Amino acid sequence: GEVQNMLEKFGADINKALLAKKKRLETYTKASFKSSSQKIEHVWKTQQEQRQKLNQEYSEQFLSVFQQWDTDLKKAEEQEEKLVNILRQQQKVFQQSRIVQNQRLKTVRQLYEQYIKSLEDLEKNHDNLLSGTQNELKKEMAMLQKKIMMETQQQEMASVRKSLQSMLL
């Protein structure tokens, strides 16, 4: 009967310890998940803002260049109409207009190449940032697992000691 009582107490102690461990594991998991979610959300928002900022910058620059280009084209057309009778002047204006258009086209090409390069650099930066965040999360999870294992071992040892003492006494 005494042995039966001691075994039942021992079983009850183990059940209590398992329930406590389960609750701690749930608490640690929820906290870790919340922290991870916040970090990922922060990274995502930062990346979103950076993309929007980059797009806005280049959109404004493209718009400015296209407006200048459009203005230049309109001026060239007006000048061509006015100078129909003067062949030499018309050729000069046309030639100048072509040079300006080529410069604008070169500017557009350069801006496009810069935009693509900046976008690629930004993506690389975001990939590196995401990789670093993932590594941090892996380290945190490993530390959490180690902490839980150590607590579990300590509690099991304490439970065994308590059970042995109660058996011996």
Image (cartoon, grey):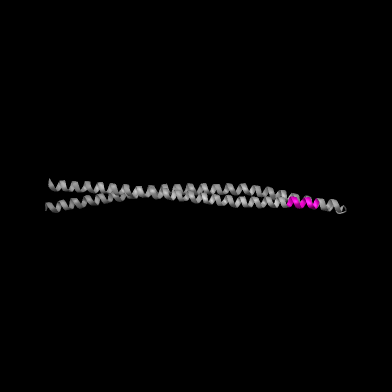
The residue at 66%/50% (across/down) is: 62
Tell me the quadrant of the picture where the C terminus can be found: top left
Numbered circles on residues, count: 0
User: Where is residue 90 shown, x and y percent of the image?
Assistant: 83, 52
Residue 157 at least partly seen: yes
Q: Is residue 28 magenta?
A: no
Q: For this view, does 81 lie left or right of residue 67?
A: right
Q: For this view, does 32 lie left or right of residue 108?
A: left
Residue 83 at least partly seen: no
User: Where is residue 60 shown, x and y percent of the image?
Assistant: 65, 47
User: Where is residue 56 shown, x and y percent of the image?
Assistant: 61, 48
The residue at 49%/51% (across/down) is: 127
The residue at 58%/46% (across/down) is: 53
Q: Residue furthest right?
A: 85
Most frequent secondary structure within the magenta stretch: helix
The residue at 72%/48% (across/down) is: 68
User: Where is residue 55 shown, x and y percent of the image?
Assistant: 60, 49
Q: For this view, does 82 lie left or right of residue 19?
A: right
Q: Which residues are magenta?
A: 93-101
